[in-house]
Image (tube, rainbow, N blue to C red):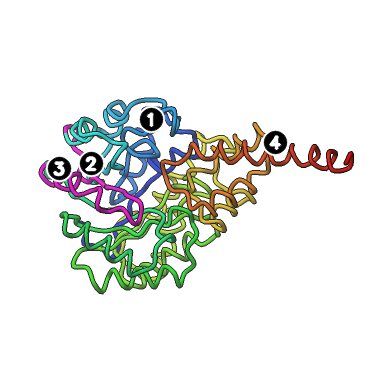
Amino acid sequence: MTDADVRLVDMTLRDGMHAVDHQFTPEEMAEVAAALDAAEMDVVEVSHGDGMGGSSINYGFAAADTEEYLDAVVPELTDTELSVLLLPGIGTVEELDTAVDHGADICRIATHVTEADVSEDHFEYVKDRGLEANGLLMLSHMAEPERILKEAKLMEEYGADAVYLMDSAGALLPNDVRDRISLLVDELSIDVGFHAHNNLGLGIGNTLAALEEGAVTTDGCLRGLGAGSGNAQIEVLVGVLEKAGYDINPDFFGVMDAAEDVLVPMIDEDEMPKLDNDSLMLGYAGVYSSFLRHTRRAGKKYGIDPREILVELGEMEVVGGQEDLITDVASRLAEERDAGPAAEAASDDD
């Protein structure tokens, strides 16, 4: 852990993969990692957007495999720590071993907010391999603070060095963040972190609320790259934290340059995160941010407004791993739409 007030984790090469359909090349990852290292970023996370092992037909195939990405990034990191993401049921022991062999410092183990009990073996293995182990509770808007505390205590019991509250849908309001983070800080003996999405335009504001309640580690992406409307924009976050008087390690100009001079030339304009109607609905309906691109594709295929699909998915309380339901919902809505005129015509004939 850093001696600064806040440890900043850059997710451009992990959560940012969602924005580019997981198509960063190893060479592009190396360029971004080198720029972040030069800017003295505390931690850089490298994985498929859905974690190690996520490259698949269900989540989207990446441009390269985990080992190729790590081969490219590791030589570019000097003082910056390397993190990888593991979702139980997606990532495998073999991929974790590969990350360890490449010098990963941190493994973040992510579960749905009410399913921390599936992670015990994963924490044990990560700790046995000598890595820092952080627990991530995803879709944290879907549980009350007391239930989140129960799940966080399980991760603490399993050996977590920190527990993160993940606003995976960008659905939390500042008071929701405060209620959850303050309870975790008061009741846990380990560090508490926060991961924001910007689907309601609250990425930076919610991050500040979390830090004010005692969180000491937080995430962001260059240019806010990420699923949905993206993550908290990390160059903005660095500037805001400096203005707020926090002691942080990353160099403000260096992080700005990494975004402007290195990342932006790699990204098509339509891949840049923006708060449009569809992504706003993610936060409003409480749907996992990585569902956005899949929903847009299904909407186009079936001629259904993506917002209608997202409302249905929100009412179903879908979670990560249920991406197959997107097509099911879109198909059903199209059938109901097409059946409407036919039913009306039949009624008129009667």
Quadrant of the image occupied by residue 32 = top left
Percent of width and height locating residue 248? 31, 61
Is 152 positioned to the left or the right of 282 in the image? left
Mark 2: amino acid: Thr
Q: Nearer the viewer, mark 4 or mark 1?
A: 4
Mark 3: amino acid: Tyr
Q: Nearer the viewer, mark 3 or mark 2?
A: 3
Residue 85 showing in the rendered view: no
Q: Quadrant of the N terminus?
A: bottom left
Is 32 positioned to the left or the right of 345 in the image? left
Magenta stretch containing residue 113, yes or no? yes
Q: Quadrant of the C terminus?
A: top right
Mark positioned earlier in the residue sequence (4 or 3): 3
Q: CA distance from mark 4 to mark 2?
A: 49 Å
Quadrant of the image occupied by residue 156 = bottom left
Q: Secondary structure at mark 3?
A: helix
Q: CA distance from mark 2 to mark 1?
A: 28 Å
Q: Secondary structure at mark 2?
A: loop
Q: Which residues are magenta?
A: 101-128
Give the residue at x 23% y 41%: 78
Q: Is residue 211 above or below residue 344?
A: below
Question: Badge 2 is on which residue?
Answer: 78
